[in-house]
Amino acid sequence: MVTRAERNASNPDLGVLSGRLLFAVQRELFQTLAELGFGDLKHRHGAVLAYLDPDGVRATDLANLSGQHKQIIGTLIDELEVLGYVERRPDPSDRRAKLICPTGRGLAQMKAADHIMAAMQERHAERVGKGEYTRFKRMLIDITEHQRLAGRA
């Protein structure tokens, strides 16, 4: 009889593969960010930072984009505000709402993270071929979106 560990070593399922990829990407991203002076960030902060725009984003939109609960996003925003990466500003289109905006430090982190991620993707594209990588990414996007929709049904 094959154990789950043996099966996932030789023929990992979608959850195991996506988890391995996520953890490996996070490890490289946050290690490199730490080397660049952003060592106070934790992996969990990526749920906000990955979707942050220079002009700001509403917390409800961050929750929807990341797939996290609004309360979790609120806690992460609080942490990032204390660390100096974001600030809350009034939304000019709706004074009742707040925009989560990057500070100067937040913008610097965003620029660094974008460069790190671009280099990571370029490395994989060179390894497997640009066409193959483009097809892989297109399929991964499709599978991810299909799974997100199935989870809402």
Image: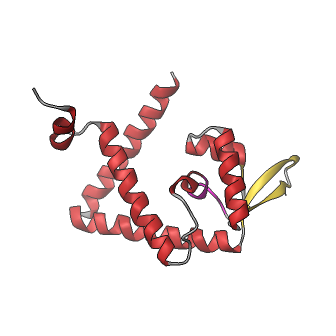
Reply above or below: 29 against 140.
below
In the image, the segment drawn in magenta is 48-53
Identify which residue is drawn at 47% across, 77% down: 35
Front residue (pair 137, 17): 17
Identify which residue is drawn at 44% across, 69% down: 31
Reply above or below: 5 against 89.
above
> In the drawing, does residue 135 fall left or right of residue 116?
left
Front residue (pair 52, 12): 12
> In the drawing, does residue 77 fall left or right of residue 65?
right
Front residue (pair 75, 148): 75
> In the drawing, does residue 21 fall left or right of residue 92?
left
Q: Is residue 52 magenta?
A: yes
Q: Is residue 117 visible?
A: no
Q: Does the magenta stretch include residue 153?
A: no
Q: Please provide percent x and percent y for residue 44.
A: 54, 52
Find the residue positioned furthest to the bottom: 36
Reply above or below: 128 against 72.
below
Please tell me in which quadrant of the rendered image residue 46 appears: bottom right
Find the residue positioned furthest to the top: 153
Q: Please provide percent x and percent y for residue 79.
A: 68, 57
Reply above or below: 88 against 111.
above
Identify which residue is drawn at 55% across, 77% down: 37
Front residue (pair 145, 10): 10
Quadrant of the frame with the N terminus: top left
Please tell me in which quadrant of the rendered image residue 26 appears: bottom left
